[in-house]
Amino acid sequence: MTQRLPLIIFALVMAVIPLVPGIPPFWIVLLDNIGLAALVAMGLVLLTGVGGLTSFGQAAFCGFGAYTTAVLTTAYGVSPWLTLPASLLVSGIAAVLLGLVTVRLSGHYLPLGTIAWGIGLFYLFSKLEFLGRNDGISGIPPLSIGAFKMLSPDTIYYAIWVAVLLSALLTMNLLDSRTGRAIRALRRGHVAAEAFGVQTPRAKLLVFIYAAVLAGLSGWLYAHFQRAANPTPFGAQAGIEYLFIAVVGGAGYVWGGVLGAAIVVILKEVLQSYLPYIFGGQSQLETIVFGIMLVLLLQLAPQGVWPWLMSKLPFKPTRKTPDTSVKLEHRERAPGTSPVLLHIEKARKQFGGVLAVNDVSFDVNAREIVALIGPNGAGKSTTFNLITGVLAATGGKIFVQGKEVENAPPQEVVKLGVSRTFQHVKLVPDMTVLENVAIGAHLRGNSGAIASMLRLDRADEAKLLAEAARQIARVGLSDQIDQLAGSLSLGQQRIVEIARALCVDPMLLLLDEPAAGLRHMEKQRLAALLRQLRDGGMSVLLVEHDMGFVMDLADRIVVLDFGTKIAEGTPAAIKRNPDVIKAYLGAAA
Amino acid sequence: MNTTIMLFLLQDGITNGAIYALLGLALVLVFAVTRVILIPQGEFVTYGALSYAMLATGQVPGTARLAVAMGLVAFALDLFFARKALHARLVIRSVALNIVFPVALLGLVYALVGPHTPIAVNIALALLIVAAIGLFLYRIAFQPIAHTSVLVLLIASVGCHLALQGLGLVFFGAEGLRGPALSSAAVTAGPLRFTGQSLAVYGLTVGFIVALWLFFGYTKTGKALRATAVNRLGARLVGIRTTLSGQIAFLLASVIGAISGILIVPITTLYYDTGFLIGLKGFIAAIIGGLVSYPLTAVAAIVVGIVEAFSSFYASNFKEVIVFTLILPVLVLRSLAAPQVEEEKD
């Protein structure tokens, strides 16, 4: 377990620090503060850096955690350990309520929305009578084990850092799993993830709750560390500060959150204690310098300090290659074995005044390669989007294996055994080829978030990765399996998309311009692969502009022009069809 | 409910709402053009207001010196980024904008400052100072990272807010300031008394909305700014200088902020950190307006102002809670109404 080694060393170092003789107690306080901030930042890493949901409101969730234990322990005399689940639960429930509203917000509404409720909650904390208004609640009992009370900073230190290390471990486990891949795909838009069955709203809500619970944990620890809770540390400023801790450290990396917390807490401390010596007792000077240093840091390392540090490492962490001998069960197939796999009846799509697809009807039979061709803007990709449920049809009916797909969402269509690639490649560039392809097998696994965190998903995970590796080998990209998808050529990325689609174990494969950007030899290999898939029982519907490729490969061709089907037939018949020639070359030809 | 009280509250709400509308407009403008969520907008408000108030007492505000210092940094950055291709024209332009302009401004402030300087001169000086700061702020903090994600720009924006707020304390002290009214005229209509000040607030707000609408709808520069907002790369390819667009956006935002500040400083005492909260209420209006629509933002701002006025009368303790949670129902409505669209983010 080579990946665990640095973590164990780090844990040992942290365990020894308070025992070093002569270490200033003040350092331990700083480390406590770093740990508390790191917990919140770690949640933000998952939420913002990985999931792409920016939140300024995390401090408010700390407040929920802190006030829950404060009220329960002081007013009701509940033991501090018993309030831990209560604190986490309250933060989690608050996150569900706010998250249901918030995570649906697109783009920039989201951060602004979180600022707004973050401030609203801060004022609520400072006005409510039973939370002690602006003075807050004091006299919170310390954490204790038996008769041992964690009163001093160096005893609660262990509680804080055990929480940090455990959370880091759980978070990394989560990211390296089926659910984690779904979360990591969120940032790049939801169409691709949904095409493979990911319930993106649910995945977003999940990370939102996860981040809130981590913040609640930090708040709970904070309350027992300070033995008091007042509104100030849970306000908008604190919420903003947590976010920039994550960004400074490296918003996409779990350890970036910890590093960011260390940088920001220490920087603030240094500025507060040394600036007055240099410039005389000028107040607020540290805020000025702090703000300026923040801007400077972002200009030097916009991705954060952690990835910058990692790129300086002399060695690269190695990845384990998956064992391809593990079998993944086939997807359950619908019993209906009608010879017509896909039946499209007068499909129609209107965008305002534009009729993109005009009553198009055609079939795809079992074991058949059908090509959908037509000039640019003929409605080919729109037809794909209607079949896969990305767009809702304005009219008409679409049947898969005799079952009507009544504008079902993409997550349902893929369950019928229809998988696709995209005209504009939709891979997650900072995930490896293997991880990208494994998203295709999302529906063939069943481990949830909690199982992934606790590493109970390994058998399931090994099967998914093995299947992904097999499909990568099938399309001939085994040499690139551990490269980041973004580093591949566009042609290769298209092939990765095909491997991802194959991971669904589909009956019907929809390929949107698969040969674009491929070299001659690569096209021949792709054609051979598609023939092999057909002979293995799969059907392929493809959109392509390379006529040589299409005529050579397709069993049947459907021609669209301005959203209307103008011809259908064998390649030989299509080549001679006067309407097709007119559409492609103009009337004079 | 007493009609007079209601009318008073309405009037108060509309006056504040008009200010929020101005700030909301500036935020929409900056975000649309540069993707920066301008947290330091509040500092433009306080800088404008307090510089004006200090000038009115015959003192030289520290902001004038800050403009000179920022100009020097901007000049250094200009030289550094153009070091591979240093043209005389470029250097002259940079010297004129970054050094001559703020230094001349500082000189002007020293020359004109005094207890009997006309109000109009003080206003002009305060506006020029804040305009210079806004312009240089974009050059220094945002132009070098203009290509990065909204999140990074946002954090940089927070950094600027912290630095500027800290500087505000240094320049203006912890004591609040109040400025002289723009005019002492007043009109009475029924039970209500409209001061010249509040009339100026209404007039300027409407004026700005119309001016922005004309600017973005009918001028070439305005259209270029909108093009930059939609697609940076595309705008550059057709010859729009996107850095210039960013500078114009910041210039406009800082001037709007400063004007808002000057409009309210005779009505309420402003402290060095008041701007943040005022700016945030502008934000609420901007969010309700969807960060794209100017008229909707203006209407939303008025609503925010009115809600604030009424809740401060009936539930003053929960005034801020009510104002800031006002946004949640709006967000819910937006979530329900807006179709899920694909976003390609960097």
Image (spheres, coloured by chain):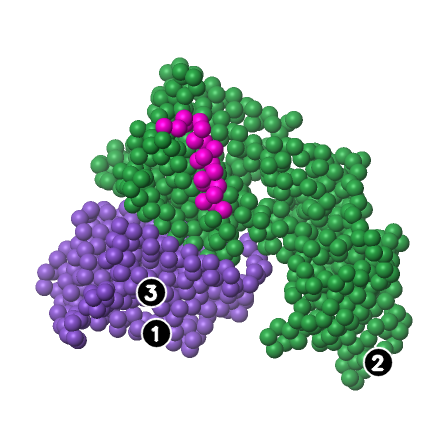
Asked if residue A51 lies left or right of residue B313, the reply is right
Asked if residue A567 lies left or right of residue A250, the reply is right
Q: Please state which of the two labelled residues, at mark 2 or mark 3, is closer to the viewer.
A: 3
Asked if residue A70 lies left or right of residue A581, the reply is left
B10 vs A469: above or below: below
- Tell me which residue sits at (75%, 63%) in the image: A404
Q: Hue of chain B?
A: purple
Q: Over which residues does the magenta segment extend? A: A77-96
- Tell me which residue sits at (67%, 54%) in the image: A411
Q: How far apart are marks 1 and 2 (CA)?
A: 58 Å
Q: Is residue A79 covered in magenta? A: yes
Q: Name the residue under label 2.
A: A578
Q: Hue of chain A?
A: green
Query: Quadrant location of the C terminus of chain A?
Result: bottom right
Q: In which quarter of the image is residue A129?
A: top left
Amino acid type at circle 1 is: Ala
Q: Mark 1 points at which residue?
A: B211
Q: Which mark is residue B303?
A: 3
